[in-house]
Amino acid sequence: MNQAANGPKPWVLISGATSGFGEATALTLSAAGWNVLLAGRRQERLERVALACQTAGAEAHIAAWDVRDREATDHGVAQLMQAAGLGSGDGDPKLRALVNNAGLAVGKGPFDEGLDDDWARMLDTNVKGLLFLARACVPYMCAGSRMVNMGSIAGKQVYTGGNVYCASKHAVDALSQAMRIDLVDRGIGVSQICPGAAETEFSMVRFKGDAEAAEAVYQGYDPLVAQDIADAVEFVLSRPGHVCINDMVIMPTAQASAHHWNKQPS
Ligand code: NDP
Ligand code: 8X3
């Protein structure tokens, strides 16, 4: 559905917009008639994505901050809302959607060999960062607004070496249900999208720049690509007001679960 056909363009805030799912979602929603507010840590990437969104017809504003920092998150959201002319008061224009997508895995191995810093990065980003951003955005939302949380198959199942990342995404699963309950009286719908293996920068981050390990994750089958998830976000956000897609699990056809694959030897 082209949002532009329905009056003034709605605004969406997308976290993790510098690469992968967030970047593809920003471009897809821009082409579908949304205006975009883009967040991430890498300023130059944000500038590049914003330019592409503008070329696709959107008004775009950016703010760079780390979602693990609560004060920076409150400040970044306020800055973006002001740039877009959105407000928290009665009668102010409101944020139509938040795509709470920023997240990462760091490391993969037995929990008793895990590193404090890796655990902190995952839990602080995927759980507390998601909460900080959601809480900061809600005052700028209204009945009809939508929140889309980026979960994972790792939030539905646990796999070898996934321990803390899986725990963080199980938390996203629980929080998505809890937020839906907490926001139902305000008419704000909460959706979760749970992808399986998708080829983005995710594995390079997880394996700390080890390109060989990252590439091996996607060998022998066709993984999802960022556009597959962007299309899902656009579908969720283009449903009529009375419809909320609560939960969507999207896998490569060659992946039946976190444990079952149809991989061809290379
Ligand atoms: P990418 O690594 O390509 O993108 C991750 C994004 O998150 C980047 O834009 C990054 O921006 C942002 N980000 C990470 N940490 C922070 C932080 N502390 N503060 C602000 N932004 C941050 O990976 P994906 O696109 O694949 O990942 C997006 C989401 O999807 C994540 O939540 C991930 O867990 C989830 N996911 C990924 C799957 C996959 O197989 N790829 C499958 C299932 C879920 P920057 O570095 O500029 O801050
Ligand atoms: C990312 C997908 O399977 O690596 O959430 O956990 S997986």
Image (cartoon, rainbow, N blue to C red):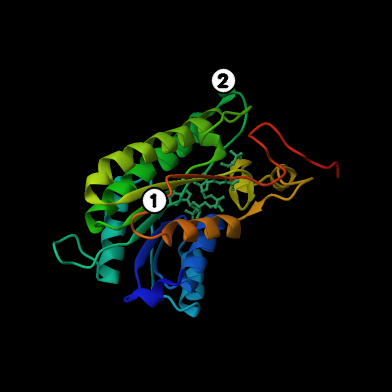
Q: Which percent across, then down, holds residue 253?
A: 69, 46
Crowding at mark 2 (Cα within 10 Å: few <14, some 14-19, many 20+): few
Q: Which percent across, then down, holds residue 127?
A: 40, 38
Disc 1 marks which amino acid?
Cys
Residues 236 and 151: in front is 236
Residues 182 and 75: in front is 182
Asked if residue 159 lies left or right of residue 169, the reply is: right
User: Would you place residue 76 above or below residue 108 in this image?
Assistant: below
Asked if residue 119 lies left or right of residue 62, the reply is: right
Residues 141 and 128: in front is 141
- Marks 2 and 1, Cα distance to the nearest angstrom? 40 Å
Look at 43% across and 49% down and name the residue there: 245
Q: Which residue is mark 1?
A: 244
Q: Which percent across, then down, holds residue 112?
A: 56, 20
Q: Could you tell me which secondary element the residue under label 2 belongs to? A: helix
Q: Quadrant of the C terminus?
A: top right
Q: Quick one: label 2 or label 1, which is nearer the N terminus?
A: 2
User: Would you place residue 99 above or below residue 170 in this image?
Assistant: below
Q: Which percent across, then down, holds residue 155?
A: 51, 35
Q: Which residue is mark 2?
A: 112
Asked if residue 262 lies left or right of residue 257, the reply is: right
Q: Could you tell me which secondary element the residue under label 1 belongs to? A: loop
Which residue of the protein is positioned furthest toward the left in this rendering? Answer: 90
Disc 2 marks which amino acid?
Asp
User: Would you place residue 224 above or below residue 62 in this image?
Assistant: above
Residues 22 and 129: in front is 22
